[in-house]
Image (tube, rainbow, N blue to C red):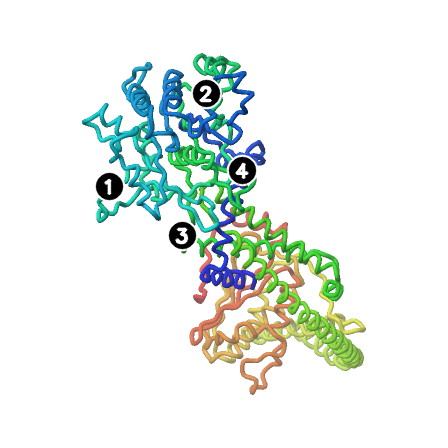
Amino acid sequence: MFFAVASIIGCLLELSAIFERQERQTINGRFEAKEWLSSSISHSNWWPLSTKLFEKKSVVNKIVIFNRDYEDEPPAEAVERAAWLKPLMKYPISSQTTAEIIEFLAKAGAKLIIIDDNFRQDSFGSKELAETINRCGNGAYGKAVPVLINHTFNPSRPENYSARSGQSNFGLLAQLSQLEPEVNIQEKYIGTTSLDLDHDQLVRSIRTRFSNDSSDATRGRIPEALIIKALKYLDVPMPADLPEKLEIDFSAAPKTEYYPTRSLSYLLNPEQQKNLLQPTAQSDLSLKDAVVLIGDGVDDVYNTPFTNEIHTQRSKTDILAHAMETIARHSWPKRLTGNQTYLYILLSAAFGAIVWVGWKVFQQTGNQSEQSKYQSLGRLIADISFSCLMLSLTDLAAGIIFAGTGLLVPVFIPTVSLGLGTLAAIIWEREREKENYFQFVLAAAQEKLDLERDKFSSELARQEAEGKAREMMHDRQRRHEFMRRINHDLNAPVTVLNWTLSELNMMKHESSQVQDKISRLVKASDKLCELIDQLVQSYNYDGSPSGSQASICDLAKVIDDCVDGQKPLAQKYEDTIEWTKPNSLFLVKASPLELSRVIDNIIGNAIKHNPQKTKIFISQESHGAFHHTIISDTGTGIPAEYLEQIFQPGFRINPNTEDGGGLGLDIAKTLILSMGGEISVASILGKGTRFQIMLPICSTSKNSQETLESEKKMQIKTRILPQ
């Protein structure tokens, strides 16, 4: 919300150009901020980047300025005491005095001399001045010192230049032409200065190139810009991107350590001349290898209603010095292009949005309630303070980013857009807080209603659970009574059957088959008695089953007994049981009766639930810490979707049959898990089923098994259906 509003408003303001004048007027203030940043941050050792952004560049050329100001015109009493002040009584000063000054500067070691066009050039004495300038260029005073003459004109009225075009027969230029007849005097000595002013009379730019209109022959050719000609004499390379109009920060007066400025009387004082000719460590100024600018125009100070403070008054020589150093250091400020301005507005809006989000996150960490935050008067004050802080941080960030680049960036447009964006965001936030508050109240009421509903549901569920618990208690009591009656009713006939079979087994029968069948009946009767006793004893009063007492037993012996007991049933269905009996012990800690219930259940299911003539394979092996018992058949198999359900109590693949109650495999799994083992099943429809029982190896079984295997090694042939 904030970013969208600030971006749209900022772009619309830029298109409308409402703040164009204000943005131009803030150029000076922007770069005063640069100076403030430079002085305050560059001395902070804790910020290493400050040296990169605000390092002070040394001046390329040593520039010294001598200006004649209002205070340089001495009173008559001073002239009587110091005769050297007499030339300053005239305005402009004479050509003879100008010649003396130029000669002195050349002797003092100046590298280049520039004189303003307000010095007398077309009166008596021009010949002497021309000869001095010529001697300076020829090295008559020690070394060749070029002298340039500044001509200023208004580019909007180029006819002003025609009077100084060098066509006159008298004056300085005519005298120089006579001394150097084969030289283009204008190209060698004349440099043009043209300052572009806006309608507030604030100097904004100085021209570096001029276009000539050949239609006006009386005007002649406009010479090269003075600042460019001077830099060429100084062998300073011209930047390729030098604009036709050079914008400079004209507001801040040049630093005295960059451009030492003295009055014109400084050059006329005999004592100062001695110090300038032979400077010492205590001298305040040296002219050796200096570019000297001489100004004799008190009217050259640009003083307007907008520049009436002393620190903003700039003379022509100040502007020329500043322009020359700006070009030499390639440090002129450049305005953002249109697309760059829009991008800067978007970046400002994005930065403000980030600050806004950070502020909202900080607010959310408070402990105030939603209602108190909305109604608090302090929120309004906090929002206003935050808005001011955000605008300050945004402008500071722009100043830091662009201060080192020299770009002139807009200030008013981002500030106004960020302010309006902040206002829109605050309004939107307040409306959202209202909505959130009402939603909070509604959610609280809904939560209270849900709590009451949950409380009612919990009470109803509790009552239903108590009813089911009472019903289960009655059911357990009925089952307990039923088990007591079974024990009472079955005990007598089973006992009689057991005794009768025992007596028959003790008798000697002629037929061995009869004797075998009686032996099997005796075993089945004994197992029946044990099952009845376990069934009765395995239920306590509340009906919870309790496991039988475990002991160390041979798993192979239990399987062998189960196979022997299941053979009559297999013969009835014409099935075949192939039991690969191992020669080693497979000792486990479990109840033999419970193991037999598991094995009988699986073998019985394989016989009863498969077609006739099914083959059943039983084998044993050991892996790691477990004995593996594998019981597989070649029956019809179990569908894959039923494999996860066959161990559930009461589940039957074909519920329409009356065989079994679906409890056998559930009992088998429960018993195996209680022994610390696992039982799994795999089946292929139409090919058969494979059950695998894993039981932990007993601690004593491992040594016994290794002993038997070392005595007699035998390969055990097993037949197992593939998974």
* Residue at mark 4 to residue at mark 1: CA–CA distance: 43 Å
Tags 2 and 1 in contact by the CB under 8 Å rule?
Answer: no
Tell me how far mark 3 sits from mark 4, CA to CA. 24 Å
Separation of residues labelled 2 and 1 (CA atoms): 36 Å
Image mark for residue 220: 1
| Residue 261 % position (x, y) | 48, 27
Q: Amino acid at mark 3?
A: Thr
Q: Earlier in the sequence, mark 2 or mark 3?
A: 2
Judge left or right: residue 501 versus residue 66.
right
Earlier along the polypeptide chain: callout 4 or callout 1?
A: 4
User: Residue at position x 40%, y 42% from top?
Assistant: 195
Of marks 1 and 3, which one's residue comes earlier in the chain? 1
Between residue 349 and residue 522, name the one nearer to us: 349
Task: Classify 293 as above or below 485.
Answer: above
**Quarter occupied by the N terminus:** bottom right
Q: Disc 1 vs disc 3: Cβ atoms closer than 8 Å?
A: no
Q: Which mark is residue 337?
A: 3
Residue drawn at 22 percent across, 46 percent down: 214
State which tag comes first along the sequence, 2 or 1: 1
The answer to whether residue 334 is above or below residue 492 is above
Distance CA(mark 1)–CA(mark 3): 36 Å
Amino acid on which the number 2 mark rests in the picture: Leu
573 with respect to 660 (left or right): left
Which residue type carries mark 4?
Glu
Label drawn at residue 35: 4
